[in-house]
Every structure is written in structure tokens, then in C-alpha cells.
Amino acid sequence: MHQAVEELKMILIAYLVVAIIASMIAAVGSFGGQGPGSVLAKGDCGENRMEILVLYDNNAYRRDLKTGWGFSCLVKGLEKDILFDTGGSGSVLMRNMEKMGVSPEQVDTVVLSHIHGDHTGGLEAFLQANPRVTVYLPQSFPANFKQGIKSYGAKVVPVTGPVKIIEKAYSTGEMGVSIREQSLLLLSKKGTIVITGCAHPGIVKIISMAKALTKQRVLLVMGGFHLGGAAPHELEAIISKFKDLGVRYVGPCHCSGDSARAMFEDAYEDHFIDVGVGRAIKIRELY
């Protein structure tokens, strides 16, 4: 009898171990519903078609486009086109989109980094032109903001932790304390592309999170780095951390500050991308 009880205990323990292992595998695969390794094993990850168009920025690149304080870009070439942030002015955003040959109707998904008006100010004008989108925003956004989006007929997806948006595109999830912010991660066989709104949680922390989530090298970090008031010695330390983290290309813009942009350009040379409104970045051209 005692032997039978012991055998039953061993069977129950074995089942428990199997269940724990299965749950661990599921947890690893929860970043997009499957492990990052399996995502990358599917062959073409979109970098041959992936392109990032900067629609809104306070830095000029194309002189025929309007600048304005804020940031917005369009990710093309994946299964759906993603509009990341909407700048500070709807009229400027819509004018620049038209000049760049971007139709609001081609956008399927909108990702908002954080609540500040220089990243959400163009949303209403965009939704008036195309309400048939899904909007991913941090859970911490006010309820009336979310309801305003729904009133146009758009779908709202509140984001807390890391989440798959579409194939090869993920959110870091909400980061930070006083200002909650998400960043956009794009996966390719060449590495991860990190797009930030203002990087309020800390640009180095965001990059570290990207590496931890994707288990890839970081091909490109672009967007606002929130370094406008940083002293030269602080910028040197941050650039050194970028190098330590293996960041291949950098494209600081918006709130990064002129000094930071200049120092990143000196440090990265031909791997510095001059990001401003109108810039088109083709991922196939990076290595």
C-alpha cells in the first residue's frame, strides 16, 4: 500500500513539472504569441519592403514640408501600415502626408507613445479622414481620451505590458513612472528597430528593454531621445551606453536636442541618420 502511494506521488510530481515547463514556454511565447526566435525563423521578416517615413518633426529634411514641435512617422511594408504618433497639429500632419503621397486610408493601425499633445495633437484630424483604424495607446491614457477615439468609430486597445501589434511589430508596453510611455519595436533579420516618441522613461532603459524582449541586436534607434537639456558629459555617457548595447544606427530627432544630435553624429559617423520631416528610411539599406 505504501509503495502504491509513493508511486502516485511520483506521478503527480511528474505532471506538476510538465505543467510548470509548459507554462514557462507559454510565458516566453507571450511576446507576440510565440517566442521571438520562432518569429525570426519564418524567413522574410519584411526588411526588403519595410520603410519608415517621417511625417512630422521639428527638424527639417525636405524643405517643401512643414515642421512643427512633435513627432509622427509611418511604418510601411509590413502586413499593415502603422502610424506612430500624430504630431502636434492636425493640419500640418495632413498637409505633410499629402505632400509625401501618404493617404490616411492606407493606415490600418495607430500607435500613440504617450499622452502629450505634441504626439497626439494630429489624431482628431486623422480620425476624421480615416476612423477605420485600431489605436494602441498606454492604459494610463484618460478615459475621456479613449472615449473620444471610440466616438469616431475607431477601436481602442489599451496597452500595459509588452504586446504584439501585428506580425513583426511590437510594443514595449508602458514604461516610466510620472509619464507613462510605450515605444515601437520592429523585428527584422538584421536586428530590432526601436522607435521612440520622447523616451521619457529613459532612452537607455528603452533600448535595454528592447534587447531583453527580442533577444536581438539593435539595428536602429530613432525618434525623440529627450536629451535637450543634457550636459556634454551626460551625453558622452549615454552615447557610450548605446555603443555598449550594440546599437548599429541612430536617428535622434524631435526632443533629442541639437547638441545631442551633433554628438551622436560625431560618434556614429556614417551610421548616423539625419532624421527630420520628410526623411524616408529603407531598412534594406542598413546593414
Image (tube, rainbow, N blue to C red):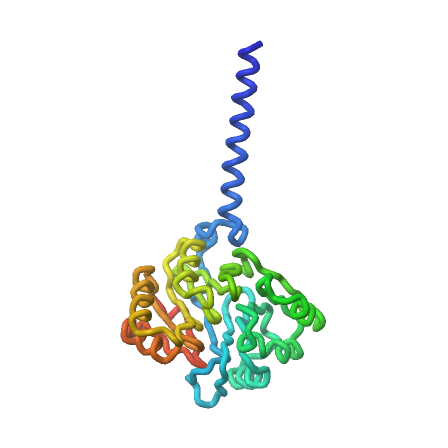
Q: Position of residue 13 (x, y in %)?
A: 52, 26
Asked whether the viewer can see residue 170, the reply is no
Up/down of 168 relative to 68, above or below? above
Q: Residue at x 54, y 75 (%)?
A: 119
Q: Position of residue 122 (x, y in %)?
A: 58, 79
Up/down of 157 relative to 105, above or below? above
Tell which of 140 and 268 is nearer to you.
Answer: 140
Q: Residue furthest bottom?
A: 64
Tell which of 241 and 154 is nearer to you.
Answer: 241
Q: Position of residue 63 (x, y in %)?
A: 44, 89
Asked whether the viewer can see residue 182, the reply is yes
Q: Residue at x 59, y 82 (%)?
A: 90
Up/down of 157 relative to 67, above or below? above
**Which of the image's four quarters has the N terminus?**
top right
Q: Quadrant of residue 163?
A: bottom right
Q: Residue at x 58, y 78 (%)?
A: 121
Q: Position of residue 227 (x, y in %)?
A: 39, 73
| Residue 19 horizontal side relative to residue 244, left or right | right
Tell which of 117 and 100 is nearer to you.
Answer: 117
